[in-house]
Image (tube, rainbow, N blue to C red):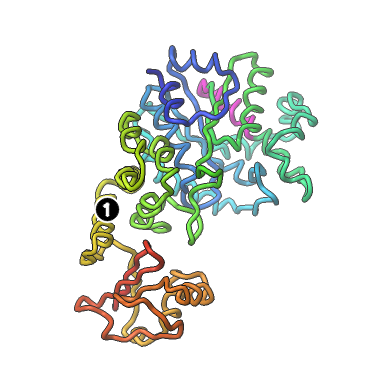
């Protein structure tokens, strides 16, 4: 089975520039390919995860990945699918984010000698001569073709700046540059990048008269089409400081039944026969698949030890023996705060985004302090609520646990 068959079976592939040629190429040759990542934050998030998994499957099959970090394109910002222009990032912010990305990616990609390449498009984009770029690259792009691109459609009402209009040319130039320097023949990426990726394929084919290809993976969405990876605190980050391993595990443990098979196929290396066995079930039996999904995804992102801790903490809590609290999110408070209002403490700790949200949940009977469902939104903590270890279990809704700990 070629990597093309693996990616197709697991549900990665969405669109291809030249399907028959790509299928034959991946069956018969070992190629160099790339995926670009713009450093818009100081951590990768779950939206990047599916691209990293696609890259990892390719590398395991003997193909060489190039991780292209967008030190140059990040100075502009991709307008694809955006209602308004992205915030301009400073060079210092971009450099910091690139360092964070490199560290996280080593969990998924083998960067040992000759196995993979890390490149930064700042190395060529920031020194480009604009007139030279227009003469060498701009002549291969027609404005009417670019304006028809799907990635710009959301911007017609608010207006698309000329600044952002250049992004497609920059990304296309990246592919041409990697093709020229490393023999890269294929770009992979999320399906929202389709228009930009086609630009690079067409540039190489027109400018160099050489074969080039692109293939998109589907975006991580729920069965009803909504984007996955959003939590109450925002994005589901791969950085444990931004999303703890316990919270990360809980996200996957609690996905909808209808999304389990898709997530397990895309985000784990569990063999597909096992995926079918675990997921092609009815009723409560799907919970076993959810446990496997949560453990396997957390293990890939945070390591086996953190996955085990999250699993043990979850089993202790949901098994009714809430005596193993050290691995759930902990909020440290001072002894003075043991007499503060519950909603003040939890809002300050960002468990609730506002006191209004906290009051609403309390009024609905959704906040449990210790073993008591809180009835009074103005209730205060008291020292006698805490156990001998100076901790107090808080449950928000049915499935989210936190621990207050007196420092």
Residue 280 placement: quadrant: top left
Q: Is residue 301 visible?
A: yes
Above or below, 90 against 389 in this view is above
| Of the pair 105 and 341, the residue shown nearer to us | 341
Q: Is residue 294 visible?
A: no
| Of the pair 134 and 21, the residue shown nearer to us | 21
**Crowding at mark 1 (Cα within 10 Å: few <14, some 14-19, many 20+):** many
Residue 394 placement: quadrant: bottom left
331 part of magenta stretch: no
Image mark count:
1
Q: Position of residue 385 (x, y in %)?
A: 28, 82
Name the residue at 76% across, 29% down.
145
Residue 242 placement: quadrant: bottom left
Name the residue at 46% across, 82% down.
377
Name the residue at 44% across, 27% down.
7
Indicate left or right for 93 with 331 as reference: right
Name the residue at 60% across, 38% down.
192
Indicate left or right for 317 with 92 as reference: left
176 part of magenta stretch: yes
Q: Position of residue 21 (x, y in %)?
A: 54, 14
Q: Position of residue 256 (x, y in %)?
A: 43, 48
Start-end of magenta stretch: 171-184
Q: SS class of the residue under badge 1? A: helix
Q: Position of residue 60 (x, y in %)?
A: 36, 27
Decide whether the magenta segment is chiefly helix, strand or loop: helix
Q: Which residue is mark 1?
A: 311
Quarter holding the C terminus?
Answer: bottom left
Above or below, 245 against 21 in this view is below
Quarter holding the N terminus?
Answer: top left
């Amino acid at each position: 089975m070629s990597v093309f068959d693996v990616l197709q079976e697991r549900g990665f592939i969405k669109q291809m520039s030249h399907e028959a040629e790509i299928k034959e190429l991946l069956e018969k040759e070992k190629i160099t390919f790339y995926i670009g990542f713009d450093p818009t934050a100081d951590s990768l998030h779950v939206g990047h995860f599916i691209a990293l998994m696609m890259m990892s499957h390719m590398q395991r099959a003997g193909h060489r990945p190039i991780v292209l970090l967008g030190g140059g394109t990040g100075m502009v910002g991709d307008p694809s699918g955006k209602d308004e222009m992205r915030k301009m990032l400073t060079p210092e912010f971009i450099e910091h984010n690139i360092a964070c990305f490199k560290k996280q990616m080593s969990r998924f990609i083998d960067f040992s000698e000759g196995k993979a390449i890390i490149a930064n498009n700042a190395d060529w984009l920031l020194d480009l001569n604009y007139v030279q770029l227009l003469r060498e690259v701009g002549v291969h792009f027609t404005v009417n073709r670019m304006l028809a691109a799907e990635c710009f459609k959301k911007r017609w009402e608010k207006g698309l700046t000329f600044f952002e209009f250049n992004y497609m040319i920059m990304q296309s130039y990246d592919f041409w540059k990697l093709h020229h320097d490393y023999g890269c023949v294929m770009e992979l990426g999320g399906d929202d990048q389709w228009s930009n990726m086609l630009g690079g394929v067409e540039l190489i084919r027109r400018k160099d008269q050489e074969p080039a290809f692109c293939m998109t993976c589907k975006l991580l969405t729920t069965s009803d089409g909504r984007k996955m990876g959003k939590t109450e605190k925002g994005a589901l980050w791969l950085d444990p400081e931004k999303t703890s391993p316990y919270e990360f595990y809980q996200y996957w443990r609690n996905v909808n039944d209808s999304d389990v098979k898709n997530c397990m196929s895309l985000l784990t290396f569990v063999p597909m026969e096992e995926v079918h066995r675990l997921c092609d079930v009815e009723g409560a039996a799907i919970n076993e698949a959810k446990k496997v999904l949560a453990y396997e995804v957390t293990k890939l992102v945070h390591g086996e030890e953190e996955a085990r801790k999250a699993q043990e903490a979850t089993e202790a809590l949901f098994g009714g023996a809430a005596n193993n609290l050290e691995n759930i999110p902990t909020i440290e408070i001072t002894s003075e705060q043991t007499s503060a209002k519950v909603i003040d403490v939890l809002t300050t700790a960002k468990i609730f985004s506002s006191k209004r949200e906290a009051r609403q949940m309390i009024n609905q009977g959704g906040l449990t302090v210790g073993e008591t469902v809180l009835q009074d939104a103005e209730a205060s903590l008291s020292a006698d609520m805490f156990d001998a270890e100076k901790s107090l279990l808080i449950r928000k809704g049915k499935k989210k646990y936190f621990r207050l700990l007196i420092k």
